[in-house]
Amino acid sequence: MIGKILLSIWDFTEKRVKWVLLIAAILLVVALIGASQVSTSNGYGDYIPKGTQTYDDIYKLDENFSNDQFIVLLEGDNLSQILSDKNLAAMKYFDDYFTGKPNVQFVITPEFIINMMKTSAMAKNPQAADAKSNESWLIDPATGQLSRQGKGVFWNPQNGRMVLGLVGGLEHDQIHDFLVEARKVVKEAGFENVTATVTGNPTFMDYEQTETPKTISKIMMIAGIGMILVLAVLFKTRGSFPWRWLSLGLVLIGVIYTMGIMGFIDLKITVVSMAVYPILLGLGVDYSVQVHNRYDEEQRKGLSSAQSVRNTLEHIGPPLVIAMMVACAGFAAVFFAKTPMVQSFGKMLILGVGVCLVVTFMLLIPILYLKDRRHDATNKPDERTATWIDNLASFIAHKATRFAIPIVLIGIGFAVFGWTQESGLEGDIGYKSYLSPKLDVTKNLTKLSVLAGGTSPADMLITADNVLEPEILQWMADSEKSFLVNNRPNDPDNPGHYSAAASGIADFFVSTFGALPTDSASAQAMLEQVPHRLWVNYVSADFKQAHIGLTSSSPEAKEKGVFLADARREFGNPPDGVTSVVSGNGLLTDRTGRDLADSRGKLTWIGVVFIFVMLLFLFKGRVLRVIVATLPILMILGWSTAVMWAKGLNVTTMLALMPAQVMGIGVEFTVLLLMRYYEERDKGGTPMDCMVTAMSRIGRAILISGLMVMLGFGSLWFAFNFPFLSQFGWITVIDMTLVIISTLVVLPAMVVYFDTWRERRTASVSKQSA
């Protein structure tokens, strides 16, 4: 059926080959326009599905409170040095520049705190500031240590901070502009003998967004160079040397077409989906190499170009279409992932694979036809000389089928071990797994984390008719106190909260005025006495929402889970009419990490079922053939998990996609070899002879295709600034090696063993019947 459709398309195309190529060129120009519209995305909606309670809770926090804050680290030898008159002037310059600027919620600097204290003191006593040093305003005279106000802007006498809080929900371009401005203003401010460094979570997100296109370009270039070399050395074709690179050139066109469609349908690039491009290079070249290899095989029989095309489409066309459909069935499993960026990756991959296959049939075939048709009259049979790859494939086929039982048993044993380790893999989307620790942005974030005494902040979002009611304020104060007092992570009877700090409007009243207000009117009056910027991130303008910031003292994923669970418990019994939910980046990190770990196993089984059903349909209900095609995929998945276990890897967003990749690519190679084997079987011959022939004919193309895919994935290893991508690159190379071993060693052993057993069984039954 598939072959007939392909031949019908060719019958229509053959008389219009040049028109097809002209239309392809026009579409390429259109695709370039669409590709220029492709944009990147890295918002909450990439990690958490919109419309879910988790997404709504995080979004609500952004509506009234600053979740994007730049921290300017101030480092000096001592408090006196940091708070010199010149440095205070630099801090005021920073404050004046950003205060009142659109989308800025608040600015807090040591200079602002000192000036506020001076103003208050001088209002009571005009001589209060005489002969008093700058640093003395932030020192508690009773202890000689930092005062409450001092601790608000200093962690210790050598390390202080300025905070630039932005309104929630800003786009990346807006945040990037603020980062550029903040760095510029800090540089121009005139700090003396002080190191001022802009950091904070937005710097992580900004680096990810701005470096993604650069990284894509680099890995695409590396993958392309590697593929050029492999094709030059291993892929021998008829005609002049440059024809070896035709497949790669056409796949680059396929990638442009894919990007063009993405631009027109507004499918954005995420930090995960940028890995699609080198993968498409590998898979697309695979399709073209298979077709080109079979076309050359037909040409060497002395056939005309037209007949060579027809034979190619008839024999390799259906297996390729089937392989693509089954691969997409495996890729489609990611649509059931809970993480939107993982789903987006699946959409891009399926789109790209489909486009690359269409390009193979609609461009490669016509080009080969035009190249050879003028030589039809002189084309003569030219038996191909077996290359060392062909001989190696035949050797492997002989040895694999000879030792079929031990090979299969060893493969199953390792696979079972890997499957038993699947449930122990944990999710991880922390910034340390995303960005290299050698980067300045990562070093600064780590330094900030150490100074703050904790990591992974979470937020409690409190909602009521008026959060300033005394009963609600008292409940918040008691909950904060309980949360901090019960910080005993080593107590077996109390797992603890791993809490480092908790701050909210109740704490602000106590630390600023010494006590909680007695009624809501008094509370509002008290707030009016102090600058708005000091409490704007604690309570909303309409006083219907309050924000309590929580900081964990542990960065580990497990402990963050405990931290959030205990936060829910401590703040889980609010007064009547009050709702309390966990929100913020800590919730996003925890939820996404758990989703990734949970999704990996689920997606694997969904993909296996999809592949099995698709193969059952395409093999017309021949269950044994389907089992033989599916079993190697199950083995590879087990082997892949065993590799992750051995390396102690957690499940990042990319490694959550690993099963779908392994299934999609592994089943393609499996189908191609099986279809060629069954083609030879239809001609007669023993299972062993047919497998040796199939391996010698298609083994080279599979090996080259495998190397192409490995180069595509392997180029990700060079994304050194993104460890999760680099890690994905090298582990996928290992997995692709396993796929090739499975295809060229395990599969032939299984197929020949089962076919031989079936023939013997059939012969035995026939003999008994006779």
Image (cartoon, rainbow, N blue to C red):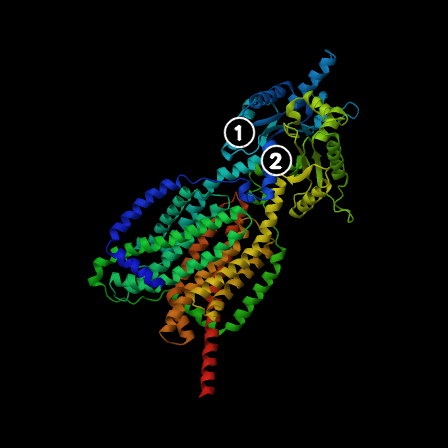
* Residue type at the position of mark 1: Phe
Q: Nearer the viewer, mark 1 or mark 2?
A: 2
* Left or right: where 473 falls relative to 357: right
Q: Is label 1 in a helix, a strand or a loop?
A: helix
Q: Position of residue 250 (x, y in %)?
A: 34, 51
249 in relation to 157, above or below = below
Q: Position of residue 59 (x, y in %)?
A: 58, 37
Q: Position of residue 1 (x, y in %)?
A: 35, 64
Q: Which residue is mark 1?
A: 178
Q: Give the residue drawn at x 38%, y 76%.
A: 685
- Marking on residue 464: none
* Left or right: where 162 falls relative to 376: right
* Left or right: where 254 falls relative to 146: left
Task: State which tag comes first along the sequence, 1 or 2.
Answer: 2
The image quarter containing residue 411 is: bottom right
View extreme (top): residue: 126
Q: Position of residue 751 (x, y in %)?
A: 46, 71
23 in relation to 612, above or below = above
Q: Give the residue drawn at x 74%, y 26%.
A: 519
Report the front residue among 457 and 76.
457
150 in relation to 347, above or below = above
Is residue 704 visible in this depiction of the protein?
A: yes
Q: Few, some or many C-alpha atoms within 10 Å of disc 1 (few <14, some 14-19, many ≥20)?
A: some
Report the front residue among 704 and 622.
622
Q: Which residue is mark 2?
A: 61
Report the front residue among 97 and 529.
529
